């Protein structure tokens, strides 16, 4: 039985139809990705699932007791509440359940056959198991560290940026683990390491999930089912993004030629996946197998750890130089540059050259300095020391604020400021509608004001405008944020055919893998590493190196422990206790069982007296506990001594 059913649901805003008689259901353990064009109804469907938006027709059926929570795009918090308090507030129900469980255990000690208490204990145990809420304090600590919130944990949450506030809300929700979790673009404002942590949590904790995302690797790693909204209807595909592509291409081949553009994008995506991603995944599987083998062999031959580490570090560093360097125009040249902001070293001793056909992704953790490097390229910031040279060429910059757009103008005025209805695009003179059709704009949008467009539509306009400029270099800051997948495909196509350099900041692993030929990786503490690998391959090696380091540290710790154990000995007193305590424990346990048996027998407890028996039971149990603890303490020491022999 489904946790939630939507049956024959329809929704329209005034005359605009959004959903038309759709059916949708969520079963326990499913992870459903909703995809489709911006403005097509993804957020509308999510709000109907959540119960926060009315629908025009149909039925919404939800199982009794099922709780749904949704990640807010613009979270709000109580004034002056701290980051840690905001997360803990989200978990109040779980914390109260844990306290109630402990209170029930105490009551059961004195009334161990009370059926109501036993039933309550079972219910609370199941609830805490379902939400994996036994060690919440440890989990809160981990999520604060992984989402880079630890340094702000005691700061008022309202003082954080919008992206940081979303991370606080997301942290609370994944720890709370509602019966159905709804996530709208959860990877926005997360760096790649945070995304990997989120993926790990969602899979490990077996969430039931409905989500919207443009991050194609995230969809592939998480989704068990993909639901596309197309022309007010739903189409369901099994699996993640790769399976969706195959099924969608087969569908498009059987439909009319009006789908030629989409079919072309689908074929391009499938070809790229076949060419590159599968090979990398195969190599990654090989790496995993090596780590498993290493764990088995490390104890027999510890030198294997260092050997493996050296091999991986060599693999991670690619020293290939561009052989056509002399034939290409130099755009930027940097030698030993340094940059510090607010006493934080963001760039230290970095040298590099950027040529006219380079495709460079700037990647790394949030706050590491990636946007600072972009501003240096844009000459908005100067380096503190070192040499930075910029050649004579034209730059176009795309940012999240869409500063190039004028809200008071319509699309024709935006693309043809001097009148007319034609636009030059990379040497071709095109009708503005013919061009904008490639960016999924219908003809009726030509006279629509920019201010009336959605955020995603404004991004599409800004991107389309970018490729009408006569430029030599594109600089892009998180270009895929707030774009739907069809628009990202168009962006990728235009970038790949662009005759110039492309420098971009992105956390979208799929986009980086597809576009970048070189990486500038911010490692922290101002260090920037240059690599010619794909980003996913670099991350796979980085992850394996961390695992090897963990194995190495564990081996070292064990060696120290064994050395320490060799010097351990039981004292004469401990030897006597180790031999005698089991008999004492056994005798006390027998006495306790006899008292409990008497308490259940009316003839016995009436003869000896309930009060006297209860006091005797409490006394014996209090006597037993420290004896067991002492025995376990000595037994642990014995095990350590045996290990060291």
Image: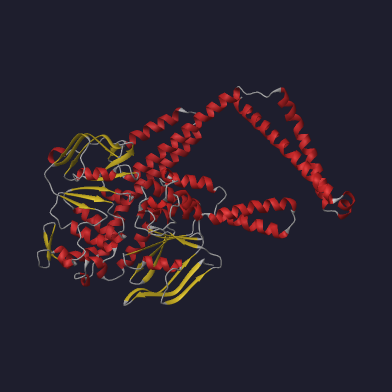
At x 44%, y 76%, the residue is 58
Residue 188 in sight in this render: no
Residue 579 in sight in this render: yes
Q: Is residue 624 above or below residue 122?
A: above
At x 52%, y 30%, the residue is 557
Residue 614 located left or right of residue 76: right
**Picture quarter with the N terminus:** bottom right
Depth check, front residue: 114 or 355: 114
At x 13%, y 64%, the residue is 416
Depth check, front residue: 348 or 289: 348
Image coordinates for residue 283, horizontal then vertical, percent: 37, 43
Image coordinates for residue 396, horizontal then vertical, percent: 18, 52
Image coordinates for residue 107, horizontal then vertical, percent: 70, 53
**Picture quarter with the C terminus:** top right
Residue 483 located left or right of residue 623: left
View extreme (front): residue: 80
Residue 91 located left or right of residue 539: right
In which quadrant of the rendered view does residue 238 lie? bottom left
Q: Is residue 94 above or below residue 373?
A: below
Image coordinates for residue 349, horizontal then vertical, percent: 26, 33
In which quadrant of the rendered view does residue 148 lie? top left
At x 53%, y 49%, the residue is 136
């Amino acid at each position: 039985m489904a946790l939630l059913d939507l049956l024959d649901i329809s929704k329209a805003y005034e005359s605009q139809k959004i959903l038309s008689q759709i059916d949708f259901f969520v079963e326990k353990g499913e992870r459903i990705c909703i995809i489709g064009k911006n403005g097509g109804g993804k957020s509308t469907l999510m709000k109907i699932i959540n119960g926060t938006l009315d629908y025009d027709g149909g039925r919404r059926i939800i199982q009794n007791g099922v709780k749904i929570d949704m990640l807010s795009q613009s979270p709000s918090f109580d004034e002056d509440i701290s980051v840690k308090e905001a997360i803990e507030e989200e978990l109040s129900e779980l914390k109260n359940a844990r306290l109630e469980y402990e209170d029930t255990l105490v009551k059961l000690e004195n009334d161990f056959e009370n059926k109501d208490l036993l039933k309550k204990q079972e219910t609370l145990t199941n609830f805490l198991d379902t939400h994996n809420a036994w060690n919440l304090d440890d989990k809160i600590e981990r999520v604060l560290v992984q989402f880079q919130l630890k340094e702000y944990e005691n700061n008022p949450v309202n003082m954080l940026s919008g992206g940081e506030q979303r991370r606080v809300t997301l942290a609370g929700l994944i720890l709370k683990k509602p019966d159905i979790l709804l996530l709208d673009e959860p990877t926005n404002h997360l760096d790649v390491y945070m995304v990997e942590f989120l993926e790990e949590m969602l899979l490990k904790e077996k969430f039931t999930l409905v989500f919207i995302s443009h991050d194609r690797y995230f969809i592939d790693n998480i989704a068990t089912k993909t639901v596309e909204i197309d022309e007010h209807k739903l189409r369901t595909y099994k699996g993640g993004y790769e399976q969706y592509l195959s099924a969608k291409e087969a569908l498009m081949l059987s439909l009319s030629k009006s789908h030629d553009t989409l079919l072309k994008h689908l074929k391009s995506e499938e070809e790229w996946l076949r060419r590159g991603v599968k090979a990398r995944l195969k190599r990654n599987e090989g790496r995993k197998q090596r780590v498993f083998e290493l764990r088995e062999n490390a104890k027999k031959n510890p030198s294997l750890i260092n050997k493996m580490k050296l091999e991986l570090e060599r693999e991670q560093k690619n020293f290939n130089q561009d052989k056509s360097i002399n034939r290409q125009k130099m755009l930027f040249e940097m030698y030993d540059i340094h940059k510090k902001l607010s006493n934080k070293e963001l760039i230290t001793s970095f040298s590099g050259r950027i040529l006219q056909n380079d495709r460079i992704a700037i990647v790394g953790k949030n706050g590491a300095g990636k946007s600072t490097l972009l501003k240096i390229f844009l000459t908005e910031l100067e380096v503190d020391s070192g040499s930075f040279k910029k050649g004579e060429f034209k730059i176009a910059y795309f940012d999240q604020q869409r500063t190039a757009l004028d809200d008071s103008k319509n699309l024709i005025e935006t693309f043809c400021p001097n009148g007319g209805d034609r636009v030059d695009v990379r040497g071709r003179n095109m009708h503005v509608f013919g061009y904008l059709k490639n960016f999924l704009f219908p003809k009726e949008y030509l006279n629509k004001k920019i201010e009336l467009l959605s955020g995603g539509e404004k991004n599409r306009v800004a991107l389309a405008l970018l490729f009408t400029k006569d430029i030599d270099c594109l600089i892009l800051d998180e270009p895929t944020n707030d774009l739907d997948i069809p628009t990202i495909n168009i962006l990728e196509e235009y970038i790949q055919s662009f005759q110039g350099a492309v420098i971009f900041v992105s956390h979208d692993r799929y986009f980086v893998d597809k576009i970048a030929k070189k990486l500038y990786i911010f490692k922290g503490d101002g260090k920037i590493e240059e690599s010619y690998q794909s980003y996913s391959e670099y991350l796979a090696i980085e992850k394996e190196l961390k695992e090897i380091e963990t194995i190495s540290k564990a081996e070292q710790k064990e060696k120290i422990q064994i050395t320490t154990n060799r010097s351990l000995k039981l004292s004469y007193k401990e030897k006597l206790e180790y031999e005698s305590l089991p008999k004492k424990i056994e005798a006390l346990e027998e006495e306790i069982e006899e008292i409990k048996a008497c308490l259940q027998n009316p003839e016995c407890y009436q003869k000896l007296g309930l009060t006297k028996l209860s006091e005797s039971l409490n006394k014996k149990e209090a006597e037993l506990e420290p004896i067991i603890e002492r025995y376990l303490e000595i037994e642990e020491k014995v095990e350590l001594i045996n290990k060291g022999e």
